[in-house]
Image (cartoon, rainbow, N blue to C red):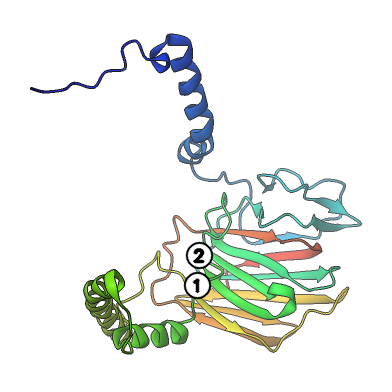
Amino acid sequence: MTTVLSLRGHPLSRPRILLSLAAVLFAVHLPFLHLLLRGPAPVKAAAPFHDEFERASLGENYWSNGGQWRIASGQVYSPGVGNNPLWLLLRLPPDTRIEFDARSEGADGDLKFEAFGDGRNHATGYVFIFGGWHNRETKIAKLDEHAPTQEDLRKALASAARPPPRTVQGIDRMVEAVREPIAAWSARRDLTRLEAGTYYDEGTPLTVTRTDLRVERARTYHMVITRKGRLVRWEMDGKLVLELDDPAPFRPESHDRFGFSSWQNDTYFDNLKIEAP
């Protein structure tokens, strides 16, 4: 005998309830539908580009999804926008030089900006962070601020490939007996790919990091970002900060935007200049 499950007569099957459930589901998924349907970021400007922000409003060349970005005293002002970039509506040349001034008025540093993103969403390209995490870290992060460096990844994979003996009992011992060989095999495979230079693709997060730099409150820094081929270079006040040699650079047609950003600090940007080197 076959039992057929049916909602006939169930309170949830009433038209009014079904319409309410459908409305709730639509509202929950609306942001994701918006992301899928809104298309690529528009273009309003072209390189070479120069902006000194000597006006009252940002104008049509910039776009943000929120965060109350605005002009203040001839500078772009960010009142701590929580990773909600102000995107320039310009397609960056594949090989690019970007210059601007930046200043943090926060007590714990944290200057941020993004290059070669999609012009819509945070962390879709390279994120540059000066004095992040309470002025402790400076990094170039591809796609994920919390991704490991190549060396940290290598160490983690090497450790996982040769797990130390464990003393576990009961069901945990049975689970580990199945899980550990699979995890070790996967780690050895990824370690081999990493050493062979085939681990990273365009969508694999990667960071380069240093911990010896500190943002000085109210000091203006001159930033220069260049990309030539797979090499992304960040200079500050004429000195090299970091370089990222990207094993799998972004395709220019889908990652070609620049944006100012911030986390929680009052931040100011000025004198933006973009050109092909």
- Picture coordinates of residue 104, whole percent (x, y): 82, 69
Label 1: which secondary element: loop
- Above or below, comparing residue 126 to residue 139 in the picture: above
Q: Is 10 situated left or right of 133 in this image?
A: left
- Badge 1: how crowded within 10 Å, few (<14), some, or many (20+)? some
Q: What's the residue type where badge 1 is placed?
A: Ala
Q: Which residue is mark 1?
A: 147
Q: Is 89 situated left or right of 204 in this image?
A: right
Q: Residue 143 has which mark?
A: 2
- Picture coordinates of residue 49, whole percent (x, y): 67, 60
- Badge 2: how crowded within 10 Å, few (<14), some, or many (20+)? many
Quadrant in the picture for residue 266:
bottom right
- Picture coordinates of residue 121, whole percent (x, y): 56, 52
Which residue does the image show at 76% across and 76% down from the upper left?
A: 222
Q: Residue furthest left?
A: 1
Q: Quadrant of the C terminus?
A: bottom right
Which residue does the image show at 70% across and 56% down from the upper left?
A: 82
Q: Are marks 1 and 2 in contact (CB under 8 Å)?
A: yes
Q: Is 12 situated left or right of 137 in this image?
A: left
